[in-house]
Amino acid sequence: MIIDDVTLHLLKLPLVQQYQVAHRVFDTFDPIFVEVRDRDGAVGWGEGHISPGYSHETIAGGWSFCRERAAVLVGSSVTAAKAALADHLADHPVATTAMITALEMLERHPLLRVEAPARIPLLDPINSKQADRIAPEIESLLARGFRTLKVKVGWKVDDDLARLREIQRANAGRAALRVDANRGYDRDGGCRFAGTLDPAGIQLFEQPCASHDWESNAAVAKVSRVPVMLDESIYGSADIERAGTVPGVNFVKLKLKKVGGLDLLNRSLARIRELGMKPVLGDGVSSELQCWMEACVARTAIDNAGEMNGFLKPRARLFAEPLAFADGAIVLPQGYWPTIDRAALAAHTVQTERFAPTRRAG
């Protein structure tokens, strides 16, 4: 299978409502879409959403990397292209994964083939900050079928604890709660929050401190009244192995966009389980394309609520047959294989560039 051309699309997808985490507020998602085509006309797509402040990657840097690699990949085999891209995973994980997953889709990777109907339960965040709006939002989420809810914290410890207590009161144990600090606390704040919270109904406490501050995260895990999950600290296999040595870290979350492709994702999820921890999967800031891929892997790789809910946040959908959502879950019909709605793609593209071989005369 030979790559005949590569087209890059930089998108801007306005959200239905602002999405706030500890380090920033999202009004739009700005993913890079990678489109690859072989000489027979088959097409594969990959997505890389680089969230400023999440890691060392930037949107501009990711775009430049994809441009450089796209020019080199045209004319090569898919197998050779994937091998060459893997060398760049440490420096450009999200951009590299976007290109590798486009090639995996072009190959019709077995993990993406929906052999039987599937339903993947999701969680959704509680966004309300005002006390009088929390209970109505929880009722709305429960009515939509969600049975796991996410609570964002990581700002001021006392305010976060008060809001969490109000959420627990309104929820009354009906949904499991995942509490996520998104690296927002220092060691003292994380320890005080985790050591003070009421554990009732809380499944886990996610990423209390900075990505590379393993000592602070370990200190929080030691005193936490609920199990800790690492997310932003985890990129490759070495991080998974290290997480397995930290007492109190019982969960590890992976996102496809960080690990380098579907095969690596599937193996990494299995390794988390082998180390005695529970894997969680999904990205709340990816669009329909990557959420679909993560849902396909989740069918057999996880047994808890997926976090691949990012596709519910933008106003626009990009699949001609949108990824189905019903009763708190992604629904995958047997044989489902998405195609991109070209009009929707064009309407939300802010930059595009195509790389193709020079055609020989005649």
Image (cartoon, rainbow, N blue to C red):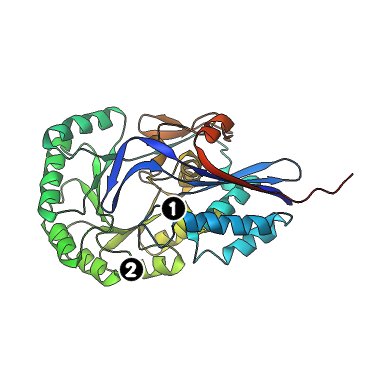
Instruction: Kindly identify the amino acid type of the residue bearing the numbered disc 2.
Output: His
Relative to 295, say whether 198 is above or below. below
Quadrant where the C terminus sits is top right
Q: How far apart are marks 2 and 1 (CA)?
A: 18 Å
Amino acid type, residue under disc 1 in the picture: Ile
Above or below, comparing residue 3 to residue 19 in the picture: below
User: Could you say which disc has been placed on residue 212 in the image?
Assistant: 2
In the image, is residue 240 above or below residue 358?
below
Image-quadrant location for residue 232: bottom left
Is residue 55 among what the camera can see? yes
Query: Looking at the rendered structure, which numbered label has been put on residue 312?
Result: none
Tell me where residue 47 appears, x and y as whole percent: 51, 47
Residue 248 percent across, percent down from the top left: 25, 64
- Is residue 168 left or right of 71 when viewed as pictured? left
- Residue at label 1? 50
Give coordinates of residue 172: x percent, y percent: 15, 37
Q: Is residue 259 visible?
A: no
In terms of depth relative to the viewer, which is nearer, 290 or 62? 62
Residue at 12%, 37% (x, y): give it: 131
Q: Which residue lies furthest to the right in this view?
A: 362
